Amino acid sequence: MVYQARITGMVLTDNYIEEWTYLGKNFDGFQLAECHLMEAKAGHDWIFDDELDVKYTFHRDILERMMEDAKAQNPLAMPRPPVKYSWYFEQPATYKYMLPILKRIGADINVHLQP
């Protein structure tokens, strides 16, 4: 939650982070001045081995949820421009794994590795 708050600028309290709901779908953050919808993911590199394969089958659920979120969010983040839609990753393995998947979902989704 700390990474999400740092990247998106959303409010973080003890056990809660504010998210942005747009057309019934949650986004990790929204920056009004830029019309920028955001997702920020941290702490997932532990599910990959050195070859970027998922260590255990049940870990795929984590990645599937990310993919499903992107598929649901992408058509809502329109028109681009002016709307910006970005995913931020804290760790390199998750970024490398998700980059081609997110680009297949939407070629104009901005994908960043930002520790």
Image (cartoon, rainbow, N blue to C red):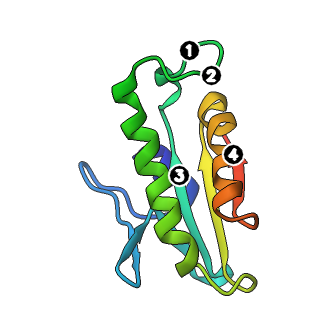
Estimate the spatial distance between the alpha carbons at disc 4 and disc 2, rounded to whole Å.
13 Å
Estimate the spatial distance between the alpha carbons at disc 1 and disc 2, rounded to whole Å.
5 Å
Q: Secondary structure at mark 3?
A: strand
Query: What residue is shown with label 1?
Result: 49
Relative placement, left or right, of 80 versus 88 is: right
Image marks 3 and 2: residues in contact by CB distance under 8 Å: no
Q: Position of residue 44 (x, y in %)?
A: 48, 31
> Label 1: how many residues lie within 10 Å, few (<14), some (14-19) or many (20+)?
few
Q: Is residue 42 visible?
A: yes
Relative placement, left or right, of 56 versus 103 is: left
Q: Between disc 4 and disc 3, whose residue precedes?
A: 3
Estimate the spatial distance between the alpha carbons at disc 3 and disc 1, rounded to whole Å.
22 Å
Query: What residue is shown with label 4?
Result: 99
Q: Secondary structure at mark 4?
A: helix
Relative placement, left or right, of 44 versus 94 is: left
Image marks 1 and 4: residues in contact by CB distance under 8 Å: no
Q: Position of residue 108 (x, y in %)?
A: 75, 67
Q: Secondary structure at mark 2?
A: loop
Q: Which mark is residue 40?
A: 3
> For the residue marked with disc 1, what is the amino acid?
Asp
Q: Is residue 113 visible?
A: no
Query: What residue is shown with label 2?
Result: 52
Estimate the spatial distance between the alpha carbons at disc 3 and disc 2, rounded to whole Å.
20 Å
In front here: 111 or 30? Answer: 111
